[in-house]
Image (spheres, helix red, strand yellow):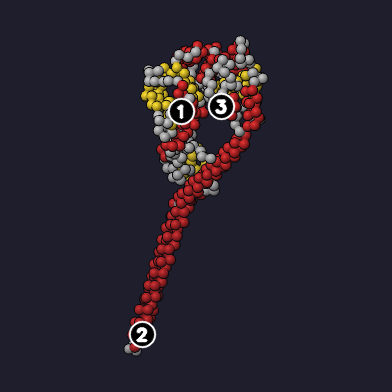
Amino acid sequence: MQVNLGKTPENPLSPSKLNNLARRTIEKHMGSVWLIGEVSDLYMARSGHAYFSLKDNMSSIKCTFFKQYNFSKIEIKNGDNLLAFGQTTLYEERSTFQLKVERIEKSGIGDMAKAFAQLKVKLEALGYFSQEHKQQIPRMVQSLAIVTSQTSAAITDVLNVIKRRNPLLSVSIYHATVQGERAVEDIIDALLRADINNHDVILLTRGGGSQEDLWTFNDISIAQTLFNLTTPCVSAIGHERDTSISDLVADEFAITPTAAAELLTVDISELKLRLSYNIDSLNKYITKNLNDHNQRLDIFYHKLEKSHPKNSITITKHLLNNKYEKLVQLASNQIDIKEHQLSKQKAIINKYNFNLTEKQIKLDFLLNTIKSLQFAHMSDNKHQLDSAVKNLNNLSPLATLSRGYSITLKQNTGEIVTDQQDIKNGDVIETQLKNGNITSQVRM
């Protein structure tokens, strides 16, 4: 299942896919319509098909009329006023919106067709067909009101689809005569009763029939009632080739009662798959967020550990120990060198067999003096080193902490707070004590 197809750079649509989606959307939501206009750009192909446009003062629509519909019995020419019935669609190869004509009549048609066209023009001028006045049909319908005859084939088809796709859907049937003298009054009464009972959607429907049979649904009173409903309404009158004023005024229309039931019900098996997919996606999202937060916590902990005063003191102490060891080694090396030099001098003196008793005493004295001086020098250096270590410990933030002071850091950056201007209202700060930490939020 592709999610957000065409909505993100990662899931782009190709031109052919977009055209295919547009065609299916047009055919599903617009269906078949009656179109009246003036013929222009007529082209009779050798194949026997006719291609032309129907235009008014503002726009024109491309039309195709295939020979299998026996249009040869009706002679048409540019400039004729035609009433054409057909399927709205999109010619994908050229991205052309068009009408696939199935039936045409000259403008000299019967009174019913004239009345339909006149009422359609009137209601269109009043905005009854305008998309901005139409309500959105809920994706998940839980309560459905059906306005139709309880004995019609349409209600049987609708209920069979609902039982198959979503038997949990709550259905209320509002009986109305859909043909005859009382039909208009019955339909209006049923629509108004359904509208006040807080259903999610109202379905106005009946099965197929002749133009006379379906004429009830071209009544202006029904159109006005549909237009003023507060509940979203779907109209499904007749079969695919039938289009009524009710279909045009309703918030949505379907080509058959069965198609309307399909539109208003969510297949439970599909819903289960979608729910499983959403749960899986949610788990992945939660896991990713947890991993991201854990990584951020590790980074902050590492920064805090690096900036902790104890680390700085440990490094400084290590450097001092290294210097002390080098100083001791240097002093020891100097003593070894001096002793070696003295030994050489003694060897030279002994070689000449002088009376060296007095000289030996002086040399021993000097040697002892040198050792005493070196030891004093080393003691002095050690004293200085111990003093430096003591001073360093006295200056250490940890020593300060032991005397009752504290160190305040920004929790998110680990920076030490030395001035009130370093923080602002709402910041989270961490106070380092001798033993333990205190986390606070700034209120200024």
Q: Amino acid at mark 3?
A: Pro
* Residue placed under numbered mark 3 in the picture: 138
Q: Are marks 3 and 1 in contact (CB under 8 Å)?
A: no
Q: Are marks 2 and 1 in contact (CB under 8 Å)?
A: no
> Could you say where residue 83 lies in the image, as x and y percent from the top left?
46, 18
Rendering quarter of residue 207: top right
> Who comes first in sequence, dot 3 or dot 1?
1
Above or below — where is 230 with respect to 51? above
Q: Amino acid at mark 2?
A: Ala
> Could you say where residue 14 lies in the image, as x and y percent from the top left?
43, 38
Mark 3 to mark 2 CA distance (whole Å): 114 Å
- Crowding around mark 3 (Cα neighbors within 10 Å: few <14, some 14 to 19, many 20+) is few
Which mark, residue 406?
none
Q: Secondary structure at mark 3?
A: loop
Which one is in front in this view, the residue at disc 2 or the one at disc 1?
1
Which mark, residue 66?
1
Q: Are marks 3 and 2 in contact (CB under 8 Å)?
A: no
Mark 3 to mark 1 CA distance (whole Å): 38 Å
* Residue placed under numbered mark 2 in the picture: 347
Rendering quarter of residue 82: top left
Residue drawn at point x = 57 percent, y = 25 percent: 256
> Who comes first in sequence, dot 2 or dot 1?
1
